Amino acid sequence: MDDTESPFDDQTFVRLMENILGYAHQKKNVIINAMGEADKETDPIPYYTLDCALCYCTFKEIRYDDTLKPEQQKLITRVKRNFTIMENTRRNNLNKN
C-alpha cells in the first residue's frame, strides 16, 4: 500500500475489520478491553490488529465529516504504521525459525 492509498478503501481490510467489529458487537469498549488483554510486546499482531479495528470503527463515525479530514488522515497513518509493525514482526518471526 503506497502513501496515497487508504486502508479504509481496501475491501479485504474492510471485511476483516467488519468481522472483528461484529464479534465486538460494534462497541469500542469491547475492542479496548481486548487490547488490554493482548500483550503487545510478546505477541504484537493481535494487539495491532485490534488497534486497526478501533481506528476503523472511529473512521466509520467521522468519514463523512469534512471538518475532520485531519483526524481521518491520522487514522489512516496509524493503520499504516500498525501494518508496518505487524509486517516487521512477521519477518522477525520468520527469521527466528
Image: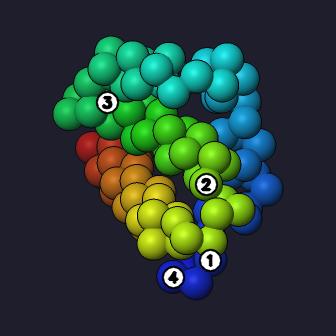
Q: Is residue 70 left or right of residue 93?
A: right
Q: Residue at x 33, y 15 (%)?
A: 37
Q: CA distance from mark 3 to mark 2?
A: 30 Å
From the viewer's perspective, tell me whether residue 82 is left or right of residue 72. left
Image position of 57 with respect to 9: above or below: above
Q: Earlier in the sequence, mark 2 or mark 4?
A: 4
Give the residue pinned by disc 2: 62
Q: Residue at x 47, y 59 (%)?
A: 75
Q: Amino acid at mark 3?
A: Asp
Q: Nearer the viewer, mark 3 or mark 1?
A: 1
- 26 to 1, vertically: above or below: above
Disc 3 target residue: 43
- Regarding residue 45, the answer to whether it shows in the image is no
Kindly report the distance in space between the C-alpha atoms of the residues bearing marks 3 and 1: 27 Å
- Proximity of marks 4 and 1: CB atoms separated by less than 8 Å: yes
Disc on the earlier residue, 1 or 2:
1
**Where is the C terminus found, in terms of image quarters?**
top left
Q: Is residue 74 left or right of residue 41?
A: right
**Disc 4 to disc 1, C-alpha distance:** 6 Å
Amino acid type at image mark 4: Asp
